[in-house]
Structure formats: C-alpha cells, structure tokens
Amino acid sequence: MASLTSLASLGEATTATPDGRPRGLRTRQRRRLNVFRYLVFTVFGLFFLVPLLAMIRFSLQGSRAGSWSLAAWRQIASYQGTGVPPLISAVEITLELAVITSVVMLMLLVPTMIWIRLRVQWISRLFEFLCLLPLTIPAIVLVVGLGPVYNRIQHYNLSALMLFWVYVVLALPYAYRALAAGLNTLDVRTLSEAARSLGAGWLTVMLRVIVPNMWQAILNSLLLTWALVLGEFTIAYLLLYENLQVELYSISRNTPNAGVLFSTSAASLIFAFLLLLVLSFVGRRRSRG
Amino acid sequence: MSSIPAQAPAVPQSRAGRRAPVAWVGTLPFLGYVGVFLLWPTGIVVVDGLKTPAGRWTLSGLSALGSPAVRGYFIGSFKLALISAVIGAVLGAILAYCIASGNPDGLIRRLYLSGSGVLAQFGGVALAFAFLTTIGPTTGVLLHAGWYYDFPLGITLIYVYFQIPLMVLVFLPAIDGLKIQWREASASLGASTWQYWRYVGGPLLAPAFSGAALLLFANALSAFATIQAWENQVAYTVPQQISTALSSEVGLSNINYADALALGMVIMVAIVMTGYALLQRRAARWLR
Amino acid sequence: MEGLSRRYGQVVALDRLDLTVRPGELVVLLGPSGCGKTTTLRLLAGLEDADAGQINVGGRDITHLPANKRDMGMVFQAYSLFPHMTVLENVAFGLRLRRIGRAARMRRARQMLDLVGLSQQADRYAHQISGGQQQRVALARALAIEPQVLLLDEPLSALDAKVRAQLRDEIRRIQLEVGITTLFVTHDQEEALAIADRVGVMRDGHLEQLGSPLEVYSRPATSFVAEFVGLTNRLAGEVRSPGTVTVRGCGLPLVDPGVPAGPVVALVRPEAVSVASNGAGSDGVPGDSPDGAGGGPLEGTVIATTFLGAVSRITVDLGDTTVMAQVPTADASALPAGSRVRLTIRPDPVLVASGSQS
C-alpha cells in the first residue's frame, strides 16, 4: 500500500485571493444552511406568535369594532362572573398554590436526592422510576383514584390549597429532571467527603456545600413547577376546586367572549415566558463566572 | 458512621457500624408521600376498575370497555394522539435541528427554548381561547374557520401547537449529542452530507426520535384541559368521557365505569411509555 | 502547502505558511496550543477553508476540493468512532461509501484490524473497548480507504502515559510499513522527537523551524525552539567579544556571531553541563573551561536530583541562580542533596534568548 505522493514544493509567493474575502466551500454551505434556518425560525415564530397576538388583540378590544380598550385587563382585578367566585380570588389561590407546591417539592426532593447520592445509591433506580411515574399516569387517571382521598379531606372543609399535595406529585418528573441535571454536574461524593473531613455535619454539607452549587437547577425546577401549577386544570376541575384555569373555564361557559378571559390568559402566558427567559440568562452568566 | 434521616435537624451521631441498611430510612418521607398521593390513587383505579359496585372482583368493567361507544372514545383518543404526535414530531425535529445548528449561546436558541418550555406545558385552557380568537368560526381574527369545531381537524391543530415545543425540548438534547467528530470523520472518509445522514446521523438519532414521538403520543392521549375547553358538549376522547362519567348524576355504577376507562388509559399509556423508556436508554448510550 | 493563511475574526491562526512533505515521510507539527498546528491539519483535510494560499497533493491543486473528495485519512483526538457500528463496520465504512461489495470490504477491514492488532475486537462496539484500542480502530479506519495522505490530530493526547508511549511506536511502525505520507500534530515534544522524520516547530501561525529531530533539538534555530524542545537553562551572561558570550566565567561560542555586545541570557542544555564534586580545596580539575581555573561562579550545592532512568537531572544552586545538569545516574548517586559541587559547561554553540539584548 505504498502511496507515493508529494505535496508541492515551497514557494515564496503569497497567493492572495483576488477579492480578499474568505472564499471556500464551507462558507457557502454554511450560508445556505443559515438561509434555511432563518426561514424555519420565521415560519415557526409566526405560527407560535399569531394565536398569542390574536388573543392579546382580542383582549384589547373596545366596545365597538376597531376600537381599543384596556377594560379587559383592568377587569382581571375586579371581575365577578355569575355563579363563580371573583376572578382575583382564583388568581390569588393559584399563586399561593404555586408557592406552597414549590416549597414542599423542594423540601421533599432536594434532601432526598442528595441523600440518595451520598448514602443510598442503590435506591436511585427505584427513585428515578417513581419520579418519572407521574408522566405515565395521566392526571385524569390520578383524579379518579384521588376522589376517595380528597373526599376525606373535604370533610374538614379545607380550601383549594389542599391541592398542593397532588400538585407536588405532578411536578415530580419535571423537577426531578431539572435537579438531577444540576446534581450531575457536581461531584457530590467528593464535595461531601471533603466537607466532612473538615468537620461538617450532614446538614451543613447539604445546606452550605451542595445546595449553593445547585442554584441554577433549583431555579429551573421552581420555574417548571410554577408553570405547571399556573396551568393546571384537570385535577382542580374534577375535584371541584376553583383555581385559575378552572375559573377561566367557568367564565367561558357562561360568557364565552368575555374579554377578561383573554387578558388573563395572555397575562399568565407572558409571565411564564418572561420567567423562563430570565432564568436562561441568569444561568449563562453564572456558568461563565 | 452516622445514620440520620435527611430532613431531621442534626441528630447526635452514633458510632454504630451500620451503613446502607439503615440509611435508606432517609428516603422514607419521599416514599411515604409518593405512596399516598401517587401509588395509592393509581392502585384504587386499577383495583376498582376490576370490581363491581358491590365490591366483588370482576372483569365486567373491562368488558364494558368493549362496547362500541367506548371503543369510539378510544379510537378518537388514538386518532387525535397519533396525528398530532406524528406532525409534532416531524415539525419539532426540523425546528430542533435548526436550533441545534446555531450559536449555543445565541439569543434565538434562548428564546426558542424558553418559549418551548412555556408552551409545552402551559397548553390547557388558555390555548383553546387563543385559537378561538385566531381561527374561531365567529370570532377569529385571522380567519373564520368553519372546520374549527370539527374533530379531529380543529383540535389537532391546537394539539400540534403544544406538541412541537415538547418535541423540541425532548429531542434537542439528542441532536446536541451528535458529536462533530462523527460528521468530520465521515467527511474525511468520503461521505457526502446525504450519506452522513443516511449512515451515521440518521441511525443515531432514530431511537431518540421514535422515543420522543412516543412521548408526544402519550402526552396527547392524556391531555384533557385543552380539549375540554375547546368543546365540552360532546365527548370525543377518553379523558372527556371520564370527566363526564365522574360528574354525571347517575349513581355509583358510573364510578366503576370511570375506573374502567381510567384503567384502560393507564394500560395504553404504560405501554407507550415503556417503549419510550427503552428507546431513550438506547439513545442515551450513544449520544451521551 | 503554499502561503496558507487563516484568520478567525481578529485572530490570525496561520500566516502564510509554506510546508512541503515528501512522499512516505512523517512530519510532526509541534507547538503550544494556539500555534496553528491543528489549523494547518484541518485546512489540509478540508474541514476548514483557507483565507489565502494553496494546497497541492501529488501535484494536484486541491484547495477548492470539499473534504469528502480529498483522498485523506484522518485520525481525531477522541470520540470519532461511530457508536452504533461495530469495530469492523467502522473500519469498513469508508469502503462501503465507495460501493465495495460486502465480502470484499469485510475482508479488507479484517486485514486492517490485523495490521493494528485488534482482530479480536472486530465485533465489539466503541464503548466496549479502551481509549487506546479506539484510536487503533480509528487508524485502521483511516487507512482502509488507502488514502494518499494520513492526518493525525493529537491522537494520543487523550490517553494515559503508558498507552501513549506504546501506541506512539505502533503508529510509527504502521506508518513505515504502509509507507504513507503522514502529518502528525502534537504538543508533546517527546512524542514528536521520537517518531518524526522531520519536525516542524510552530508558534503563532509561523513555522519556526523545520528539520530532523536531531537538528531541531541540538541546533535550534530560534530561542523559542530551544526552550520549547527539551529543557534549557537560562543563564545570565555578557557578550564582550563578537561570537563569544561569557557565562559565569566560561567563554562559550555563539550560534549567531552577530549578537551585539552587552548583557544577554544564554540558553544552555542540561546535558552540556557536567557536575563534579567539589572538595574543600580546589583540587578538582574543572575540565574544559577555557578561562582557566577559579570556577567560583560555577560552584554550588545540589538541591535536588530527579531520577529519569539511565540519566538523572541534578538541580544545583549557584547562589544567585539554579542550573539543571544531566548526568548518568551512576554519577548522580554519588552527589546527594547538599553536596558541594562544581559545574563545567561544554563549549557547544549556544543561543541567546531573543529580547534579552538591550
């Protein structure tokens, strides 16, 4: 397999390109790809934006066609539909639910996950399976089985905040994945051993050593949980609680074109989107620091 | 070695030589929680779906699932899920590829990822409203689509709206996992772009793609909020029928009916998700 | 390659590089990261576009040819094996692209695997074999298509030391056996010196020196090369008469007679320094020192000895500076830390560090 080739011999001259700009295959290929990409982004961008814009447009509709008004947006605070609690109370409840769910979820997951990584690795398969199980068990199924459980709770006439128990379960898969991704970037074992060799107790290890390195993952999981709670409908509806989505649904059954429906929906969507966008910026800056 | 449960405040460390057998106690809070609020309800569904109202074991609940009406609901669910999953998977894959081949720190990627994160989960009621204002037969800003309330046409479009972002979220890591070295190695061995995708890129992405498509399918099967907000008079899909069964006034027998339906759903989704898990494992091995 | 240039924005990766590789030769491009060696390789492979210049192979201008039409085999640093194919399928891949029948290409693939010594692993997958084995497969795969040129981009950098040394010699053996023109890129000078026919030392997009390993090592063209390849002592000295630098009382000839008078930093190799025990009296003969005895400036204490096998490196403290000397281990063992010693510098021509002249 003798390959007898020679590359051309030395030359003194510099062979500059005639027009001085980078030529070459790969630049051309790259440019073609970019045209395609931007086309795709535009098409999809439009597809995703148009319904949202339409909804916003609708929410700014005045009493006469073609006129504009912020009435629908102001109504978010004041709306009172027939036969339903005021909209604002549903908003409050949902926000509170989001907070409670997040806190409980973190308290449940973070210590357990760290603990498993440190001391009980053999359980991690089972743990992962359990965390991802809610993906397989649709909310609609869960609620059928939850009926009896919640009936018993209803006995004590507690508010919709009791929904947090099941919301944490719903959030498990997403929060688990976000937190696991964060933990994977850390060598939890080494960190904790180093800390322990310096005299730290388990709690200190957890709070002072590991958690501070997981901020981005924790934020991530929080956001996913929030998005989930803000958008949850099925369980609240079938268990006869009035959270934000159920409230909107009820309003739409009575007054299908109530402007407040659209303004509230738009508001919550924009809110969630901004949160996620901010998170993605925060994440990047930290990783470069 | 200390053996304190994870969430208790610092407990005096004991010098017992026991390790793992006791440490798992630290996971009890979690296990307990999940047991009560996830496993138990599921168990109830499975068990009650196999029982008569009187409490005896029976398969009659399951046979009720064989009735034409019920079959109709399952077919409806299936149809909707299949179409929206396929369209969502293909379009989502294209979008994911375009995102992946761009600047990893760029604005576009960040925008699309955040957007996908929101839209994939947030569907629900708001989405139905949004589409109502866009193409609703009387209120549409863009056009008045007479087919908006047709099944599955109108609702499929809405489902696709959240299926595509979900696909992007699930499939993008796989595309990112394609190492540049493979592309370059195949080029140096003489492969054209087409040959690369046919022999290397395609086969490598296939498990991830199929897995993601399955996930989309399961996702559409389970969806309730959007279709309920879209059209709540007629039940087309199983979740809608479950809801009707639960909220109807007729007595206890309907609970078992709902359980049976739910059981049917669990089986369907479980099969799909198992497929997804297996494919993910394969994809992860190659594309880690 | 003629006049190859490449820039990334403001950064000039390659500046009018000229390089010729003779048939069957193994040229190693050596240099620190960012010096442009990898860029050169990738330009040759067609994985990057040149901003200016020309590339010829076998007399043909291939500058505008896409990567997959150039007839080259390339071995990457890591991760280049296709994970979904067995080792055999990986090696046969290039042949499959050329539409060679299944039987023929499997036969050839097995041949290549024999060449690199991995016939046993033919049915394994990439994740089932070690890093060193993966690189062998990569080599087999690149050679299977009988390319005109073989390109290796730091193929050993990701491996551990023992495997690295083994594989390095393997690669050289195979290259000689096959007789293929090869360009090898590395930042490890030991590697470069061990296997190259010629070494090209690069820095900041320029070729500082191109020559045989011996040339590059013992007659470095610039001080950068002297300091990058092998170890060097930097010793303060002064040029009093043209062509000679006086270092610590010794007069040493200069490589470049045109160095102007004044203080300079001379570069002296450890093997040019010999060490002798210095008893209480100056009864030891200093050796070749042309300046006569009185080696005050060359007297010092041993600080440390590094055992390197057949030779050892002794670090000596001369009071105001430290000097490394390389001596046979047998001699070194007689000079433990703390011994008082006298150094002698062999009068090989030395370089001065650039920028050290005022």
Image (cartoon, coloured by chain):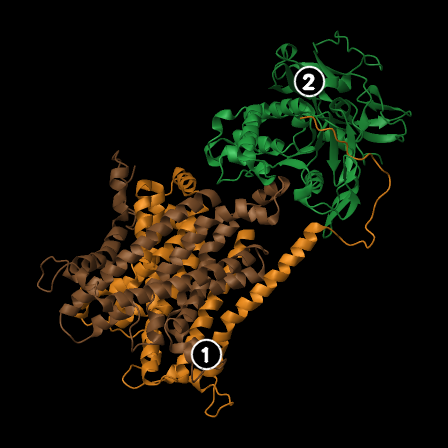
Chain colours: A orange, B brown, C green
Residue at point 42% right, 55% down? Answer: B212
The amino acid on which the numbered mark 1 sits, given as a three-letter code, is Ile
Secondary structure beneath disc 2?
strand
Query: Quadrant location of the C terminus of chain C?
Result: top right
Instruction: Give the quarter of the image for residue A97.
Output: bottom left
* Residue labelled with disc 1: B135
Q: Chain of mark 2?
A: C
Secondary structure beneath disc 1?
helix
Residue C326, label in figure: 2
Q: Is residue C273 left or right of residue C349?
A: left
Q: Is residue A127 visible?
A: yes
Query: Quadrant location of the N terminus of chain C?
Result: top right
How far apart in space, not on screen, are marks 1 and 2 (Cα)?
A: 85 Å
Residue closest to the eye, C266 or A147: A147
The furthest residue to the bottom: A64
Residue C194, label in figure: none
B28 lies above or below C323: below
Residue closest to the eye, A33 or B21: A33
Q: Chain of mark 1?
A: B
The furthest residue to the top: C283
Instruction: Give the quarter of the image for residue C245.
Output: top right
B201 lies above or below B148: above
The amino acid on which the numbered mark 2 sits, given as a three-letter code, is Gln
Residue at point 37% right, 84% down? Answer: A78
Residue closest to the eye, B56 or B14: B56
Camera-nearest label, 1 or 2: 1
